[in-house]
Amino acid sequence: MAKRRQRVALDLALITLGCALYAFGLVTVNIANHLAEGGITGITLLIRYWWHIDPAYSTIVLNIPLIIIGYKFLGKRALAYTIYGTAMLSAWLWIWQRLPVSLPISHDLFIAGVMAGLFGGIGSGLIYRRGGTTGGSDVIARVLEKNTGIPMGKSLLGFDVIVLLASLSYLNLELMMYTLLASYVFSRIVDFTLEGAYAAKGVLIISNQAEPIANAIMDKLERGVTYLKAEGGFARDQKRMVYAVVAPTEIAATKRIIEDYDPQAFVTILDVHEALGEGFTYKRKPRRLFLS
């Protein structure tokens, strides 16, 4: 129970931080440099331009029907986090607009576009990683991810394009191009944040020397291995395939081990965006500097 409370407290703290970063970028970069935004946030900027309504208020109003949609498709925790995220985004938008904070980047719209994407992407990524959203198109993106498997970054980019086309009603083409740059950076940073900052490599090895190779990986690299059953498509012969997950810096050593035992081995190296477990998220004893 105590761990659950700690986890919830951490979730809410990171959602708050994510909302603060997202709102900061929106106020000090997007609005200050006349850049648009995608999704529901972009609609609030349209409303701000045409009717001079504070985005802090329109964010709440526009999100009410979307939160109702979220009630039908999202779990209780995700819904509660979405309501919390929407409230925090609105609060931070209100705060940043009233604090004398600015960034001296108005001289370079390219920097402004990149900065807008970075603040928005990091902020939103933190929120999504803890199971929350800031409402708006985030809710629709999460529903799509849950039911169709479409990555949130890609669906958010699609929503952005629709709203950005509408934003041409008050933006010139130059500002729109820099806004598209911000949207692209945003989508890439969101995906990167969700996939995890620690990249690893998955190694699939098909060899007649599977056991010696596996033993060497366990002994010299201190990485766990798994045996998988494989069948040759042409000869129909049964083989054992070795699967191991190693750090990117260990790929060269892994290749040397394989070559020592079987230069003809068939090896596939895969990108692993996040690795959880012993040796990656748990402590492991220090290894020797040089492999024998």
Image: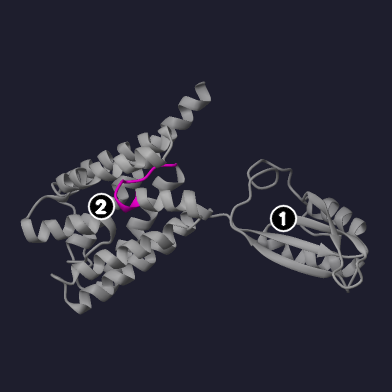
Label 1 vs 2, first from the N-terminus: 2
In the rendered view, would you say 124 is above or below 206? Answer: above
Q: Quadrant of residue 36?
A: bottom left
Left or right for 44, reference 268: left
**Picture layout, residue 240 above or below residue 65:** below
User: Left of 38 or right of it: where is 46?
Assistant: left
Quote the CA–CA distance across marks 1 and 2. 38 Å
- Is 168 one of the magenta-colored residues? no
Residue type (three-letter) at the residue carrying disc 1: Val
Q: Position of residue 27 (x, y in %)?
A: 20, 55
Structural crowding at the residue carrying mark 1, measured as other residues with C-alpha within 10 Å and reported as few (<14), some (14–19) or many (≥20): many
Decide if residue 108 is in sight here: no
Residue 31: quadrant of the picture: bottom left
Q: Bounds of the magenta span?
A: 131-138
Label 1: which secondary element: strand
Which corner quadrant holds the C terminus? bottom right
Q: How is the image coloured?
A: one colour
Residue 261, percent across and down?
91, 66
Q: What residue is disc 2 on?
A: 24
In the picture of the structure, the residue carrying the numbered disc 1 is 245
Given the image, on which type of amino acid does mark 2 rest? Phe
Is residue 281 visible in the rendered structure shown here?
Answer: yes
**Compared to 25, does 132 lie above or below?**
above
- Crowd band around label 2 with a 10 angstrom C-alpha radius: few (<14), some (14–19), many (20+): many
Query: Camera-side residue: 102 or 166?
Result: 166
